[in-house]
Image (cartoon, rainbow, N blue to C red):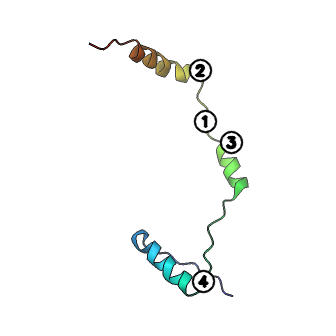
Amino acid sequence: MEKLIIYVPERKSALVKELLKELGVTIEKEKMDMEAHLKEIANMPVWTDEDLKPIEEAREAFNSLKPA
């Protein structure tokens, strides 16, 4: 068996997959590189309590509004 990588326009993807399946082609989904993903997540910034304070204050102010 031969591995083939093809790029298909999004709007024609379902049609191409259907045709290939009819021909007996196995379609594999891309597998996520979990190690790289975990490293990427580890480098994401974290919001501090100070960062969240204005959002919390705005939420409290919004919730304190009374309907007219």
Judging by the rendered image, the residue that carries numbered circle 4 is 25
Element assignment for label 4: loop
At label 1, which amino acid type do we have?
A: Pro
Q: How far apart, in angstroms, are the residues tagged by discs 1 and 2?
A: 13 Å
Q: Residue furthest left?
A: 68
- Residue wearing tag 1: 45
Mark 1–mark 3 distance (CA, rounded to whole Å):
8 Å
Q: Is the C-beta separation of discs 3 and 2 under 8 Å? A: no
Residue type (three-letter) at the residue carrying disc 2: Asp
Residue at the location (62% across, 40% down)?
Answer: 44
Per the image, the residue denoted by label 3 is 42
Task: Determine which residue is flagged by label 2.
Answer: 49
Nearest to viewer (mark 1 / mark 2)? 2
Q: CA distance from mark 3 to mark 2?
A: 19 Å
Q: Earlier in the sequence, mark 4 or mark 2?
A: 4
Residue 61 point in image, percent of width and height: 41, 14
Q: Is residue 9 above or below residue 58?
A: below
Q: Earlier in the sequence, mark 4 or mark 1?
A: 4
